Structure formats: C-alpha cells, structure tokens
Amino acid sequence: MSLDKLYLGGAEFADEIGNKGKKMTLVELLPCCLKLNFDEDFCALTGEELKRKGVEIITNTRVTKIEDSGKVESVNFSTRQEIQQVYLYKCNRLQK
C-alpha cells in the first residue's frame, strides 16, 4: 500500500512509520506524547526525534468524531480541524 500521508495515534507506532519515511500526524490529548509514563525532558526529546522523522505532532487535542461507512472518511478534532480521507490507527487508554 502506498500512502502519501498517514494520520494516526500512538508515539511508538508513529516512530515506526517515521522510520519508513512516511509523513504522518500524531494527535495527542495531553500537552506532549508519552506524558503519562515519562518526565517532561524525555517527552521533549521524543517529540523532537519524531519531528525529525517527519511526524507532525498535534497536542492538547481530542478526537471528537470519526465519520465512517465501512472505512474512515473523516476525523474531527476539538480544535474544529477536520481531516478527510485518512488511514486511522486509534490508540487510547480505557477510562473507568
């Protein structure tokens, strides 16, 4: 499959896609990726490395709606941004 741009979530997965030279966007609810597991210095280094690999990082943003009819057609965000015709890898924690 040949993709020009890939939008998805998950810092680890983003790293692997970046290693393959694909452009993509990582959407993160928190102020920086990996914030729940690591300190701010490590998060900053990780963000810099992902950006170096061509990963766009959007932080402080919630996915509010996913339009699909068998495949994802668009994704809407709390920033009122919408991305259409996407490949989506959803990675999130379950909350009680």
Image (cartoon, rainbow, N blue to C red):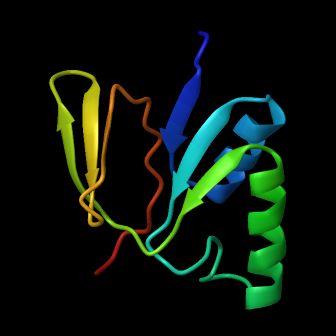
Q: Nearer the viewer, residue 90 or 60?
A: 60
Picture coordinates of residue 72 (x, y %)? Answer: 28, 29
Q: Establish if 11 lies above or below 96.
A: above
Q: Which residue does the image show at 65% across and 73% down from the upper left? A: 34
Q: Which residue does the image show at 75% across and 48% down from the upper left? A: 15
Q: Which residue does the image show at 54% across and 32% down from the upper left? A: 6
Picture coordinates of residue 70 (x, y %)? Answer: 21, 21
Q: On the rendered structure, is 75 left or right of 33?
A: left
Q: Establish if 27 lies above or below 42.
A: above
Q: On the rendered structure, is 60 left or right of 45?
A: left
Note whether residue 10 is visible. yes
Q: Establish if 49 lies above or below 15.
A: below
Picture coordinates of residue 49 (x, y %)? Answer: 84, 59
Q: On the rendered structure, is 64 left or right of 63?
A: left
Picture coordinates of residue 14 (x, y %)? Answer: 67, 47
Q: Which residue does the image show at 68% across and 48% down from the upper left? A: 55
Kindly give the residue lying farthest to the top in the view shown.
Answer: 1
